[in-house]
Amino acid sequence: MQCDTNEVYNTSKITGMGYINQAGKGYFPDPWCDYASLEMPRTLRNVLQWCEHIWLNNGTFRTACERTVRYFLTQIEIKDVSDQEAKKWREYLNESVNVIDLLANLGDDFMCYGNVFSSLYVPFDRFLICKKCGLERPIQKVDYTFGKNYQFTGTCPKCKHKGIFERRDRRAAEDETLRIIRWDPHSIIIQYNPLSHDVEYRWRIPESFKREIRDGNPFYLRTTHWEFIEAVRDDKLFRFNDKMFHHFKEETLSGIRVMGWGIPRLVSNFKQAYYIQVLKRYNEALALDYIVPFRVLTPSAGSSREADPILHQNLGAYNSKVMNMVAEHRKDPATWHFLPFPINYSSLGGEGATMVPSEMINNALDEMLNAQGVPIDFYKGTMTLQAAPTALRLFQQTWPQLISGFNGWLTWFVQQTARIKNWEPPRVQLQPVTLADDLEKKNILMQLAAGNQISKQTAYAPLGIDVAEETRRIFDEQKETSELERDAQREMSEQQQMEERIATMERGAAGAMPPGGAGMPMGGGMPMGDPAMGGAPMGGAPMGGGGGNNTPQDMLVQAEQIANQLLQMPYEQRKSQMLQLKKSNEALHALVKSKMESIRQQAQSIGGYQILQGGSPG
């Protein structure tokens, strides 16, 4: 195969005259000289265009190829770096770059074109600098003019100097994600040395892009690296940096001169694709002309010459009456119709269902996809579990170039990203699909890991489990569980202590209460020893609760005395006394507060709430 201009091959050069002589019995046509051979693409550019056309117009072929690509997209293994670095790379690849989706798109390019061209785009910010005062501002904040000399001119907003701005490009923030450009293979030019296998890649810049640059489109001037603008200025091809550009391709036979290009596998199935398209074309004709029958109404011939309406009726009037009858029936299907003569009804066609070559199309499509390297059971989803391990292993061996292409692209991307971001480069690759899909092998690995014969990471990696991350999560869960258990135990202990304290106090209070329950005088009067009535506090305990009473009975009596005293105080003073009591004796504070609530409720029940002064309890 020659690149661009020469023919792919010519069957007449292979088979001579195109006929086979059968020992003087005449000539038979050359079986290689068929209609499909006449339509074969002759140049590499035509091959790419034809493959693109098939991809966009044959949905079954496209879906089968997409399933093939995505079958090999497994978990990404990151090795030879610390756990912290591996976690950083994993987050960057999966969350920032969405590397699996990106690999899927690259794989689609590979299946269609047989070539994948990609490069790194490093985000940058462009600034314009005044040559007189040195004012530097982003290009989008400067009023400038982009002239034919490819220089930025304008007036400095600070010193008002009119002239040429100096351009300066800086890399964007460190945390900004690098972008991947998938290049159109139609605009890529390859210069290839067949001896050294050295390759240079150039981009034929589209005229629409050149026009935007030359017209000074602000968006293009702000987001386009200056090397591309210089190529537009000089009207030359753009040569890619070898480190920033990557190409993986479908290799072919050494005897085919492809000059550094890959040949899509679909080219080998051109005749089968041509055959399928012929069947579909005639299938479309059948659907248009033979599926819906053609209905005909004709006058019925009479039994004699005198009774034959064909001889005595005006056929023009007959046709008009029949058409009016059909029109009325469409308006009102329940209407009655009248004709002065009998008619016959017949249908023509409608036999398209028996003529459609559906079985031939399906067989041809199965043959084409099988030749493409996609098992029939795989793209139909009918593969059984028993046959899956062997079939999938053979399927993987059919596409080694796709797997190596993915792994090679990942290695290139990680190395260039590490160089630009100054990170530690790891070793990356896709997890082998036989390991990811072989249930028996997974069980063996789990058993070996349980016996400490292999690492847990090796056993759990096919399941998409990061052992280090899961270990950290286990420790976090255990820590959180322990804290919750401690909190629950502390609450239960405090509640139990409070219940025991209250029970003890209640038992002491029951033993000290006078007969008849004379804790409150009849008629709702204040208890004995009320300071408001001229008495002294019972027991003589100070307000702060610092007396020598230690028994629960003494504490209850003291709490009742303090509660009676506090209820006679203004709110602010009562609140202050309660705070002091809480600091000195929390247990007594709780009892006093309870007693105050009890006295209020009793006072409300007997209508004596007016003797209580102040607001809310302390």
Image (tube, rainbow, N blue to C red):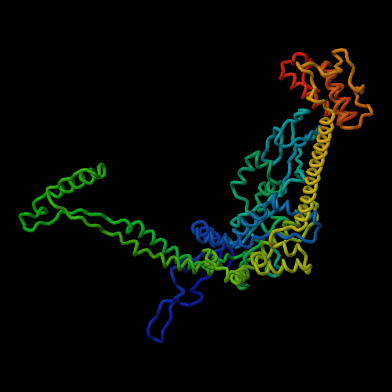
At a point 67% along the width and 58% down the height, the residue shown is 201
Q: Position of residue 337 (x, y in %)?
A: 18, 45
Q: Position of residue 426 (x, y in %)?
A: 78, 59
Quadrant location, the N terminus: bottom right
In the displayed image of the protein, which residue is found farthest to the bottom? 23
Asked whether 365 or 206 is in front, the reply is 365
At a point 81% along the width and 57% down the height, the residue shown is 82
Tell me if residue 476 comes above or below residue 552 in the rendering. Answer: below
Q: Is residue 548 left or right of residue 59?
A: right
Q: Position of residue 166 (x, y in %)?
A: 76, 39
Quadrant in the picture for residue 559: top right
Q: Position of residue 459 (x, y in %)?
A: 73, 64
In the displayed image of the protein, which residue is found farthest to the right? 548
Quadrant in the picture for residue 80: bottom right
In the displayed image of the protein, which residue is found farthest to the left? 306
Q: Is residue 41 left or right of residue 591?
A: left
Is residue 7 something one can see in this rendering?
Answer: no
